[in-house]
Amino acid sequence: MSRMNAPLRVSTFLLLEFRQSTRLQVRLHSQDKTKGFSKIEAGTMLQQLQADLAAGVLEIVPADWPDVHRIAERLSAAYTETQGHRLADIFHVATALYLGAAEFLTFDGNQKKLAVGEGMKVPL
């Protein structure tokens, strides 16, 4: 992030998934303290997300969701049976393709494989 000279473009779907995942991790932590993270940690993460949005570190970009769905359907048909991609991963890559992204940021190996297979660079 520190090397970026422009805001990181994000979809509303990515923001929803981040918030949902954060809340799920709180639940996991409440059931087993070795998993997830505390409600306080989650609150801090969600506040930082909002601060990054407000400061322009992150930029929400609009998407035409029916177009994204068509791209996702193509990706699903082309890759899922042979590579085992989850819908959320396909949806993120489809959104990036719709937006014309040349680079794709992920820590997920399978998602990286999909993005690279579609011609995007994945740093790290």
Image (cartoon, grey):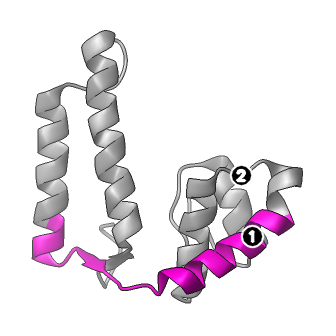
Q: For mark 2, what is the residue?
A: 85
Q: Which residues are magenta?
A: 52-78
**54 is within the stretch colored magenta:** yes
What residue is at 17 percent from the left and 71 percent from the top?
53
Q: Amino acid at mark 1?
A: Leu
In-front residue for pair 43/24: 24
Residue visible at 25% across and 16% down?
Answer: 30
In this view of the protein, can residue 118 be seen by the observer? yes
- Tell me the tag on residue 90: none
Tell me whether circle 2 and circle 1 mark residues in contact (CB < 8 Å).
yes
Q: Residue at x 50, y 64 (%)?
A: 105
Q: Is residue 120 visible?
A: no
* Magenta highlight on residue 37: no
Tell me the residue that label 1 is attached to: 75
Q: Is residue 42 left or right of residue 98?
A: left
Alpha-carbon distance for marks 2 and 1?
A: 9 Å
